[in-house]
Amino acid sequence: MRSIRLLLLTLLILAIPAASFGQFAVSVMIAPPPLPVYVQPMAPDGGYLWTPGYWAYGDEGYFWVPGTWVMAPAVGLLWTPGYWGWGGSAYAWNAGYWGPHVGFYGGVNYGYGYGGVGYQGGYWNNGAFNYNRSVNNVNVNVTNVHVYNKTVINNTTINHVSYNGGNGGIHARPTSADQIAARDRHTEPTTMQTQHVRTASTNHALLASVNHGRPAIAATTKPGEFDRGAVPAKQAGGPYKAANNNTAATRTTANNAAATRANENKAAQNKAAATRTSENKVAANNAAATRANENKAAQNKAAATRTSENKVAANNAAATRANENKAAQNKAAATRTSENKVAANNAAATRANENKAAQNKAAATRTSENKVAANNAAATRANENKAAQNKAAATRTSENKAAANNAATRSNESKAAAQRAAKPAPRPESHPQSAPRPEKKTPGGK
C-alpha cells in the first residue's frame, strides 16, 4: 500500500506541467545511479557559467541530463545545482536555481567547482565573470574571458554518489551560509535550460537502463547542442544496479491500481471541481452584485457627504474670510487713525518745541546782541573820551610847550638885543662907509 501511495504521488507530480518547475520534480523509491566521469568542454565565451550534469527521472526511469555551459540570466547570479534527497520514504528531487549566492545542493560532488559545499569555479567582478582555471576549461585567448588560478581540493572520499541521505547516500547538512542563501531571491532555470532537459528526456541513449551509467553524451558546449561539441563519459561512476523484475511487476500492478484510482479521483475531482466552480461562480456573482450595490451606495453616500462637507467648508471658509477681512479692515483703520493721531500730536509737540526753542534762541540772541552793543557803545564812548582827553592833554601840552618855546625865543632875542646894546661902537674907517641899515625887529621885541 505504501508503494501504491508513493507511485500515486509520483503520477500527480508528473501530471504537473514542467514549465511550473523548470525541472522534473519527482519522488521515487529507487536511488539514482552514481555520477559518470567526463571531461568538461571548453566555455564558448565569457559570461557562460557551468551547470553540472545530473540524473533525472522520467516515464522510463532515470536518464542523464548532460552538463552544459549556460549564459547567466543576469550579471551577478550564480547557479545552485539540484540534488536528490531521501525524505524518509522516497527520494525526492530538489530543483536547481539562480541566485546571488550558491546554496545547499546536498553535498554532492559534481566537480568543476561544485565540490559539495559552495562554488570555487569563479566569481563576478565589475560586471565580468572571473574563471578559476584550475577547475574550468576556458580559452584564455578570448578578450572578454577573465581568469585566475586557485587550487581546489575535491572531496573524493564519497566517490560519485549522486544523492543525499538514505542507504549509501551523502550525510551533509546545510551550513549557515547555505541557510542565508536559501533566503535569497531565487530565479528559475532559463528557457534554454528547460529545453535542454526536455531534449535529454527524449534521447533514448541517455536512459540509465541503456547506457548503464555511462552516457554517450555526458556534457555539451551549449544547452540543447547534443550533436556538436558533445563530450562522452569516460566511465561510469560506479556499478549500475538495474531494477529487478519484482519491482517492475509491483510497479505495473501499482500503476493499474493507480490508474483506476486516478480515474476515480479524476472523476470525483472533476465533479467536485464543477460543483465548486458553479458554487464559486454563483457566490462570486452574488458577492460581485452585493459589492457593486454596496460600492454604489457607498459612493453615493460618500459623494453626498463630500458635497455637503465641501459646501459647509466653502461657506465656513467664505464667512471666515469675510470676518477676517472685516476685522483686518477695522484693525487697519484703527491702526491708521491711531497712527495719524500720534503723528499729529508728535508734529504739534515738535512744532511747539521748535517755536519755543526758536523764541528762546531769538531772545537769547537779542539779549546777547544788546549786551554786546551796550558793551561796544560803552567801550567806544570810553575810548572816545579817553582819546579826547588824551588829545586835549596832548594839545594843551603841545600848546604849553610851544608857548614855552616862544617864551624862550623871546628870552633869547632879548638877551641878544641886550648883548648888542652893550657892545662898543666901531671905529671910523678911512673910506667912507654907508650908513648901517636899521635892524629888523622880531615879534615881541622892544
Image: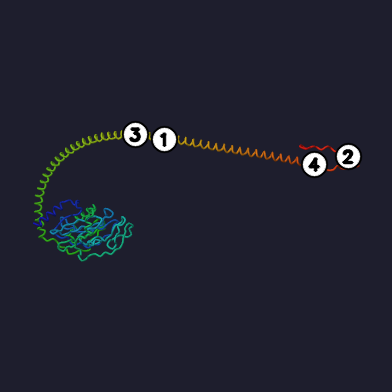
Question: What is the C-alpha distance between the residues marked 1 and 3?
Answer: 22 Å
Per the image, the residue denoted by label 4 is 418
Percent across and percent down for residue 223 are 24, 55
Q: Nearer the viewer, mark 3 or mark 2?
A: 2
Position of residue 280 in the picture relative to residue 109 (left or right)? left
Task: Mark 4 vs mark 2: give the one in front.
Answer: 4
Rendered image coloring scheme: rainbow
Q: Are marks 1 and 3 in contact (CB under 8 Å)?
A: no
Nearer the observer, 136 or 316: 316
- Residue 421 position in % (x across, y down): 82, 41
Q: Quadrant of residue 113?
A: bottom left
Check disc 3 and report the residue beneath it: 334
Compared across the picture, whether 442 is left or right of 295 comes to: right
Is disc 2 placed on a helix, strand or loop?
loop
The three-letter code of the residue at mark 2 reads Gln
Quick one: label 3 or label 2, which is nearer the N terminus?
3
Residue closest to the eye, 332 or 409: 409
Cα–Cα span, label 4 and label 3? 121 Å
Q: Nearer the viewer, residue 441 or 362?
A: 441
Q: Is 227 situated above or below 370?
A: below
Between the C-alphas of marks 4 and 2, the distance is 25 Å
Cα–Cα span, label 1 and label 4: 100 Å
Please identify, in this view, whether the residue under mark 1 or under mark 2 is nearer the observer: 2
Image-quadrant location for residue 144:
bottom left
- The amino acid type found where label 3 is placed reads Ala
What's the distance in space between the residues labelled 3 and 2, CA to CA? Answer: 136 Å
Q: Residues within 10 Å of mark 4 (few under 14, many from 20)?
A: few
The C terminus, quarter of image: top right
Using the image as rendered, state which of residue 422 and residue 299 is in the foreground. 422
Q: Given the image, on which type of amino acid does mark 4 rest?
A: Ala
Q: Circle 1 sits on which residue?
A: 349
Residue on which the image places disc 2: 433
